[in-house]
């Protein structure tokens, strides 16, 4: 079966096990050597060794060999034969003996389009996995939930994402929390969605925290809380995330301008109606807008001394040229063009 001299110490060890080892050693060596030779371009010998291991009787080696052979055959364009070995791997894998194989198998089934088989693999695993392997169960729950969400089976997805969030490690929890936030938002539960998004923000995950922050800012903007939306968007923009950072900057410019105009108008109304002031001149209005991008004009169409004060405020774009500023410069308070504390 093997030709030529071993190319390295590992091949020499596995070749020796194939000739002189026990049945278990021979099966393990056939799997390892077969994968190595296939990867090195010795496809014929590699496939023969993998078939020998996959057709053997070793309960720990058979599913691994069948999975490796399924991947190799599929990559070689023999998808139908690869699917047969994928099914064999699913049928022979034991969650108690090889949980890593089950997880790899489920992922591979989904990637190869065998979604129903992937669902069956994950569900069987979750029924059989030991309580002590809660982290592995959390990983399986997250992957299965993702499939259910794509199938629009949202209640099943929610329960599994909750399990992944509850039992998963700190590397998995943020992924489950973002998925739950998205799911709650889709089901019109903004309060629950905000809880999960804020948890991710607090966890400060480098990739997921900006995504959660952006979603949270959109929620606040749609709810009319522009100030909180701007505050969160600034944090997202400053995170430097390659996707959500630029998206947050793009959102910031019109929102900051809108807040600036709103503050200006509030100030003019206070000046006009507050403190019992009955005199209202255009100069007063312009004094409030001196640093703004707007001109303001005040009119008193009602004749004076009539006992009624009617104020009409007209806002028009300023003709003063403005130097382009980035959203971050605007938000962080550039002394000439930005917001002042």
Image: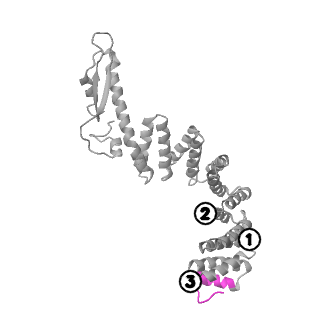
* Residue 108 placement: quadrant: bottom right
Considering depth in this image, is 181 or 6 the residue closer to the camera?
Answer: 181
Mark 2, residues whose alpha carbon is within 10 Å: few (<14), some, or many (≥20)? Answer: few
Kindly give the residue lying farthest to the top in the view shown. Answer: 306
State the image coordinates of residue 269 (x, y, percent, origin top left).
Answer: 34, 23
With respect to residue 204, does 307 lie above or below? above
- Which one is closest to the eye, mark 1 or mark 3? 1
From the viewer's perspective, is 296 left or right of 27? left
> How many numbered marks appear?
3
Mark 3, residues whose alpha carbon is within 10 Å: few (<14), some, or many (≥20)? Answer: few
Secondary structure of residue under mark 2: helix
With respect to residue 84, does 30 lie above or below? below
Q: Which residue bears the numbered disc 3?
A: 8
**In whole angstroms, how far apart are the C-alphas of marks 2 and 3?**
33 Å
State the image coordinates of residue 201 (x, y, percent, origin top left).
Answer: 50, 46
Which residue is drawn at the image coordinates 52% and 48% (left, top)? 203
State the image coordinates of residue 42 (x, y, percent, origin top left).
Answer: 59, 82
Q: Which residue bears the numbered disc 1?
A: 59
Residue 111: which disc?
A: 2
Mark 1, residues whose alpha carbon is within 10 Å: few (<14), some, or many (≥20)? Answer: some
Dot 2 or dot 3: first in sequence order is 3
* 3 within the magenta span: yes
Which residue is drawn at the image coordinates 72% and 69% (left, top)? 88
**In whole angstroms, how far apart are the C-alphas of marks 1 and 2?**
25 Å
Kindly give the residue lying farthest to the bottom in the view shown. Answer: 4
Span colored in magenta: 1-18
Secondary structure of residue under mark 3: loop
From the viewer's perspective, is 318 left or right of 111? left
With respect to residue 95, does 24 lie above or below? below
- Which one is closest to the eye, mark 2 or mark 3? 2
């Amino acid at each position: 079966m093997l030709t030529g001299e071993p190319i390295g110490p590992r091949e020499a060890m596995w070749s020796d096990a194939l000739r002189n080892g026990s049945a278990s050693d021979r099966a393990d060596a056939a799997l390892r050597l077969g994968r190595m030779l296939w990867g090195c371009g010795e496809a014929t010998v590699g496939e023969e060794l993998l078939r020998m291991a996959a057709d053997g009787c070793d309960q720990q080696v058979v599913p691994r060999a069948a999975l490796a052979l399924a991947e190799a055959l599929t990559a070689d364009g023999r998808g139908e034969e690869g699917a047969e070995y994928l099914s064999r791997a699913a049928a022979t894998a034991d969650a108690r003996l090889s949980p890593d194989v089950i997880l790899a198998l489920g992922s591979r089934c989904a990637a190869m389009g065998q979604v129903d088989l992937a669902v069956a693999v994950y569900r069987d695993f979750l029924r059989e996995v030991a309580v002590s392997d809660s982290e592995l169960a959390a990983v399986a729950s997250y992957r299965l939930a993702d499939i259910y969400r794509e199938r629009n089976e949202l209640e099943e997805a929610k329960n599994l994402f909750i399990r992944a969030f509850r039992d998963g490690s700190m590397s998995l929890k943020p992924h489950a929390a973002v998925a739950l936030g998205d799911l709650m938002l889709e089901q019109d539960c903004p309060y629950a969605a905000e809880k999960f998004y804020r948890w991710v923000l607090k966890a400060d995950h480098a990739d997921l925290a900006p995504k959660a922050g952006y979603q949270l800012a959109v929620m606040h903007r749609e709810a009319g809380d522009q100030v909180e939306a701007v505050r969160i968007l600034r944090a997202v923009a400053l995170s430097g995330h390659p996707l959500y950072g630029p998206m947050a900057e793009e959102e910031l410019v019109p929102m900051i301008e809108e807040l600036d105009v709103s503050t200006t108008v509030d100030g003019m109304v206070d000046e006009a109606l507050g403190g019992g002031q009955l005199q209202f001149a255009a100069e007063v209005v312009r004094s409030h807008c001196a640093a703004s991008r707007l001109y303001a004009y005040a009119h008193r169409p009602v004749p004076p001394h009539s006992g009624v004060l009617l104020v009409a405020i007209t806002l028009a774009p300023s003709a003063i040229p403005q130097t382009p500023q980035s959203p971050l410069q605007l938000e962080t308070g550039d002394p000439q063009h930005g917001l002042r504390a």
